[in-house]
Image (cartoon, rainbow, N blue to C red):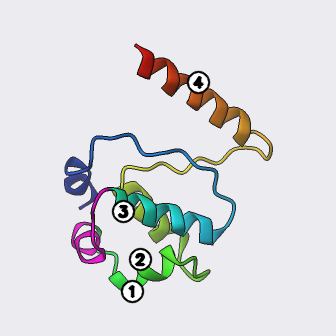
């Protein structure tokens, strides 16, 4: 299901964010879904996740299961990284530097 969806993705690179709460995770998923011009119904059709689940997840409702949340992220072509506390800033700075280098090439 997700493979078909990912082939239709917008080719622009999604922004990188640090996420610390379920609400922030959901907000970033919503932002990426909207960036790709996908309705809840289109997202449901591609992933099998119900529109109710996606809506609650995007609003940060804490009962969203991590497995379904990860499926939502993966379907949008996003990866969730787990880093030791305090390493996120260093990793984000390295990604920003790499993206800056690529855009100048």
Mark 4 closeness class: few <14, some 14–19, many ≥20 residues within 10 Å: few
* Residue 21 horizontal side relative to residue 59, left or right: right
Query: x%, y% of residue 11?
Result: 28, 41
Residue, x 40% and y 13% (percent of image)? Answer: 105
Residue of label 4: 97
Residue of label 2: 54
Q: Earlier in the sequence, mark 3 or mark 1?
A: 3
Q: Based on the picture, tell me whether residue 40 belongs to the magenta stretch.
A: yes
Query: x%, y% of residue 78?
Result: 43, 50
Mark 2 closeness class: few <14, some 14–19, many ≥20 residues within 10 Å: many
* Prevalent SS, magenta region: helix
Residue, x 61% and y 65% (percent of image)? Answer: 24
The furthest residue to the bottom: 52
Residue of label 1: 52
Q: Taking 48 as reference, is 32 above or below it?
A: above
* Residue 29 horizontal side relative to residue 37, left or right: right
Quadrant for residue 93, please give it. top right
Residue of label 3: 33
Mark 1 closeness class: few <14, some 14–19, many ≥20 residues within 10 Å: few
Quadrant for residue 63, please give it. bottom right
The residue range painted magenta reads: 36-46
Report helix, strand or loop for mark 4. Answer: helix
The furthest residue to the front: 104
């Amino acid at each position: 299901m997700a493979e078909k969806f990912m082939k239709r993705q917008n080719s622009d690179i999604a922004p990188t964010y640090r996420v610390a709460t379920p609400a922030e995770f959901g907000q970033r998923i919503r932002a990426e879904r909207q960036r790709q011009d996908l309705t809840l119904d289109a997202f449901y059709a591609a992933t099998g996740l119900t529109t109710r689940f996606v809506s609650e997840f995007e609003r940060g409702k804490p009962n969203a299961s991590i497995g379904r949340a990860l499926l939502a992220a993966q379907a949008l072509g996003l990866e969730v990284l787990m880093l030791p506390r305090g390493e996120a800033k260093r990793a984000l700075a390295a990604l920003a530097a790499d993206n800056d280098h690529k855009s100048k090439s």
